[in-house]
Image (tube, rainbow, N blue to C red):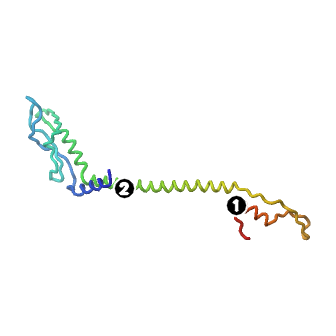
């Protein structure tokens, strides 16, 4: 159902007779049966709001007459009219409006979930890219220049030393920035 149809249905429900809808039996003069079994008068159904009749199934061509003999009399009713009247009474304006409200709320939740799913998909993509970048950074190596021995008068032993300029050059060659120059 498109938004336009839902809106049209909402407008129709808002314009329809408000109140509690219900169905009940209507005595009908119509005839049913054939030949000698032909009989007249049966129970049809109608839809009401309060005491006002909204819809009477008396002239329905879809009638499906059921007959039953009670000990005192023969009773007949329109089963199709009964089922249709019960449905129409249940599908009243208040029910339709409530269903439309629930549908709109569900559509809103679906839209919110779709937005959240897109955010999660983007976050997953970003996390994957960041993990790949971390792996690349962790895989880098810096080959330091060879050490040389520095002999200092204040120290009793020689100390292995790296040339600061050569260390910075090796770090830069690995693509790592050097601060504090």
- Tell me residue 55's x, y (percent): 16, 48
**How far across and how far down the image is residue 109, in percent?**
41, 55
Q: Is residue 7 above or below residue 25?
A: below
Q: Does 27 sit above or below residue 136?
A: above
Which label's residue is closer to the chain start, 2 or 1?
Answer: 2
Q: Is the Cβ of the residue at disc 2 closer than 8 Å to that at disc 1?
A: no
Q: Which mark is residue 45?
A: none
- Give the residue displayed 22% in from the left and 45% down from the top: 86
Describe the element under mark 2 as helix, strand or loop: helix
- The circle on residue 175 is 1
Q: Which residue is mark 2?
A: 105
Residue count near mark 2 (Cα–Cα under 10 Å), binned few <14, some 14–19, many ≥20: few
Residue shown at the point (34%, 53%) measured from the top left: 103
Q: Residues within 10 Å of mark 1 (few under 14, many from 20)?
A: few
Q: Would residue 156 be found to the left or right of residue 112 on screen?
A: right
Would residue 146 appear left or right of 172 to someone viewing this image?
Answer: right
Going by the picture, which residue comes out furthest to the top?
A: 36
Position of the C terminus by quadrant: bottom right
Q: Quadrant of residue 137?
A: bottom right
Name the residue nearer the viewer: 104 or 33: 104
SS for tag 1? loop
Task: Point out residue 132 in the picture as x, y percentages from the top left corner.
Answer: 62, 54
Q: Nearer the viewer, mark 2 or mark 1?
A: 1
- Vertically, is 155 above or below 91? below
**Residue 61, image x and y in percent?**
15, 39
């Amino acid at each position: 159902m498109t938004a336009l149809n839902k809106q049209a249905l909402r407008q129709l429900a808002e314009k329809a007779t408000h109140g509690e809808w219900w169905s009940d039996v209507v005595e009908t003069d119509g005839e049913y049966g054939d030949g000698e079994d032909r009989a007249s008068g049966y129970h049809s159904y109608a839809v009401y709001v309060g005491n006002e009749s909204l819809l009477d199934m008396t002239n329905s061509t879809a009638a499906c007459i059921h007959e039953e003999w009670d000990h005192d009399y023969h009773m007949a009713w329109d089963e199709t009219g009964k089922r249709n009247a019960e449905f129409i009474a249940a599908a009243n304006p208040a029910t339709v409006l409530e269903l439309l409200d629930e549908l709109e709320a569900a559509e809103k939740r679906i839209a919110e979930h779709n937005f959240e799913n897109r955010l999660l998909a983007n976050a997953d993509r970003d996390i994957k890219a960041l993990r790949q970048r971390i792996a690349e950074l962790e895989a880098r190596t810096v080959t330091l220049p060879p050490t040389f021995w520095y002999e200092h008068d204040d120290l009793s032993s020689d100390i292995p030393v790296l040339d600061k300029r050569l260390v910075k050059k090796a770090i830069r060659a690995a693509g790592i920035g050097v601060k504090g120059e």
